[in-house]
Image: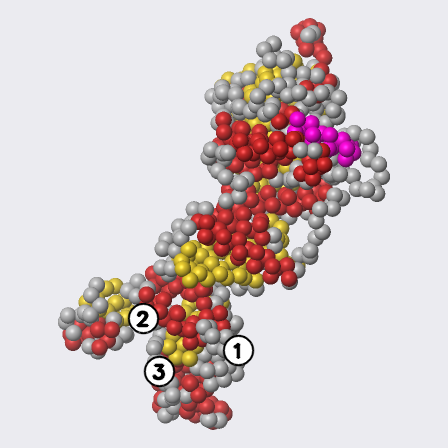
Amino acid sequence: MDKEHRDPLSPQPLAKRIFVVRSNTDVSASKSISTSKRMRPSGGGAVAPFFAPPPAPHSRPTRIEQLRALLATFERHQDFGRGPATDSPEIAVCADWTLGAPEVDGWLPDRQLDVASLGEIKPETYNDASAALAFALLLAARRLGMGWTGGRPSSASSTGRPGLVVWCWPHRLARENGGLYGPGLVRLGLDPARLLLVETATPAETLWAMEESINSEAAAIVIGCLDAVPLTPARRLALATATHCTPALMVTAARSPPTAATFARWRIATAASAPHPFDPAAPGDPRFKLTLERCRGTAVGGVAPSSVVEWNYDAYRFRLAADVGDRASAAASRA
Amino acid sequence: MPADRPLALVMHSTHGLEIAAANEAARALGVRAGAGLADTRAALPELLTLPADRARERDDLARLARWCGRYGPTRNVDGEDGIWIDITGVAHLFAAQPDDDGEQALLADLSQRFSRLCLTVRAACADTLGAASALARFGTPPEGSFVIAPSGGTSHALAPLPVAALRIGADDVRLLERLGLRRIGQLYGLPRVALERRFRALSRREPSGAEAIATVLLRLDQALGQYSEPRAPLVEQSTFSARLPFSDPLLTAAGIEAALERLCSDLAGALAEAAVGGRRFRLTLYRSDGTLGEVAIGTSASCRDDAHIRRLLLEKIATFDAGFGIDLMTLETSEVTRLDAHQQALDADVAGTHARATARLVDRLSGRLGKGRVMRLLPRASHIPEAAQKRAPAISAAPAKLPAQSEEAAPTFEGRRPAFLLDPPEPIEVLAAIPEGAPALIVWRRVRRRIVRAEGPERLAPAWWAAYVPRAPEAGSGAARTRDYYLIEEAGGARYWVFRAGLYDKERDEEGDEGSDDLSAGVPRWFMHGLVP
């Protein structure tokens, strides 16, 4: 059997795979360039061709930046699971995967989400599950970086990151929460043509499908929904994301224990939506109460940063809900 | 069941119970197939009988025909009691010496394996299907248990056989015998026109005389190879295949995997040489006890990458039971299309790399989880929300067409659409301030939810054409009533997309003539249709 497709639940020789990652950092830089072929070039997904016009700023990073980012990834994961990573904020990391709200991005190391890691999204209560799923979708939209031209999201791979959004969940959750709906995704900024939907019979199959997708070069981001993730599969997923530079998000149930080996754990609650610009009785842009319960590379033990953000349908980005404080007075004045 | 006691299978016929088949011992005592059971019983009271099961016999024969794939890919059941195998270009594989044509060895191997399965076999090999069928059923095997008509010697081999061997009806046989034509050889020299005239004279009373002689001559021509005979193979014939026999049966998973690797690389080499790729691959594992296992995989794009094919097949044979061992493996491909070599590892070809990686991923996921579990969302031109999208298996959705399709066909809705759609919609209980207005309180999944904000209604008329156009996207969606959609927000902030199906009487009056179209008049009902972020 090939090393990469064992049953996700069987015990794995983790040490061996960690060694593979580590050995890349130990050898000289030229060695790591040669091994980088195995990794998916993660910036624009591509290296600019030699004779192409210079890439536009922020759209496609240069080769040297990509390699730096790759090194940064190695450094971040060399002492995987032992303590906070030691990466300096000066290193420009290839993928600019942010929420778009500077205040919230500031909670994260490097002011952005780690593309080579497993993230977890948990609803605060059972009723917030749909908000957690929506937050995962919005992060995927941010990851693809589409729709910057406004109007409607463009599916051309030239404007955003190539690759698929792979959405895996057991059939039971799909029935409970409703199936993904293309026209609604368009409005969120996600092109349904870029979505690969996997509905499995069992949670174990979901984990397997996630790992396969991460290991494939096809995925730009992998999202899985499960009630809980056991320790071993979680570590496998985390290692796969680190090896392939493809981020993965787990949406888990509110009450289940936190997933291991994650980079960050978000707690999501629905919040009353923003005021509608024209109709005070209608719901406006959706708002979420975000709490970053845990994040690797930040101070351990303080109060978890929390804030209410809203999704801006026009700019396809999050922004801090400005009028949270005087919502009560606004409501009073409206009445 | 003791083999030395007379045993017959009986079946119902128009004249009561009738012997369908008899074993060696019974035949020796004069039991004939087709005779009535009562007569036979009278002559042979100790005859044992069992009911014949035609359906099961046919199934078993078909299974046996499948198993015969080890002697040639093109084979099928022949009549009620035979199997034909096209061994063109296959026989030499069984040859012991290079100058041997291998037919002898092939038939010997076949007879031996059948006898090991406790089956009596009458095998024959000839240039045409008709001749082989005649020789197998009516030929007198010289030694061993099979007849081989040498290439070009068909007419000589057929000459001594009775005319019944020509696969013609009993009436035609009787007619020929009345003409004194008992052996096939007697038909060779006869002038056809004269034969036809005599036939017609003898069967003047029946109008089918001309047809009967035409059948006889056609069968004769087919048997002699002067007229081609179409053959329908049991399984779709594949142009590209690889086979690997083993002298010792394979028992271990490691051995099978190693053999599979070799088969895949052989097949991939053949495909690459012809610059084609396949989309369906079928691996057949022949167990030494005469049973076989088949594993089929499909790929979303034309493919000839041996590592990829091997991985897909390995997934499927992980639970395969090797039984007493595998002594032959074959790998075939179908749906072959042209696939030119592509240049690899050029950084600029991002789109191509991603398309290939996507196809790989889809194949792997679909192969293990099932085709229907890995899906793409395709847009459809419909205003009914549940009909506006189609979930298609990703393996059959052409990946190249997807983006363009969604650009053109994706309906742009002014109103909000949910990211998660409940299909079918779930009934809810609603309390509204005014009957035609937005909900003020809903009960969904047994939980009361107080609604603080609402937007709507967005009125969607029913798709009246769905009843007349069976292929319309809306057909079968049950959207026969006018719907009023509302986007509502609960006190906590959760947003839902609900609709009211049907109109109140007052509204129906306002809508005028539409009221009569509303098929299921009655109290409007509320449904939860989606969750909006």
- Give whichever of B45, B264 is nearer the camera: B264
Say if residue B387 shows up in the picture.
no
Region rendered in magenta: A59-75
Looking at the picture, tell me which residue is in the foreground, B517 or B487.
B487
Q: Earlier in the sequence, mark 3 or mark 2?
A: 2
Q: Which mark is residue B228?
A: 1
**Residue visible at 57% across and 38% down in the picture:** A212
Most extreme residue toward the front, as rendered? A27
Q: Are marks 3 and 2 on the same chain?
A: yes
CA distance for labels 2 and 1:
30 Å
Report whether B73 appears left or right of B61. Answer: right
Q: Mark 2 vs mark 1: which is more N-terminal?
A: 2
Q: Are marks 1 and 3 on the same chain?
A: yes
Marker disc for residue B10: none
* Corner quadrant of residue A272: top right
Q: Nearer the viewer, residue B501 or B128?
A: B128
Magenta segment main secondary structure: helix
Q: Residues within 10 Å of mark 1 (few under 14, many from 20)?
A: few
Residue type, numbered disc 2: Thr
Tag of residue B142: 3
Amino acid type at circle 1 is Ser
Helix, strand or loop status at disc 3: loop
Chain letter belonging to callout 3: B
Residue B528: x and y in percent read 55, 27
On residue B120, which mark appears?
Answer: 2
* Residue found at x 57% / y 59%: B267
Secondary structure of the residue carrying numbered label 2: loop
Q: CA distance from mark 1 to mark 3?
A: 29 Å
Q: Is residue A148 magenta?
A: no
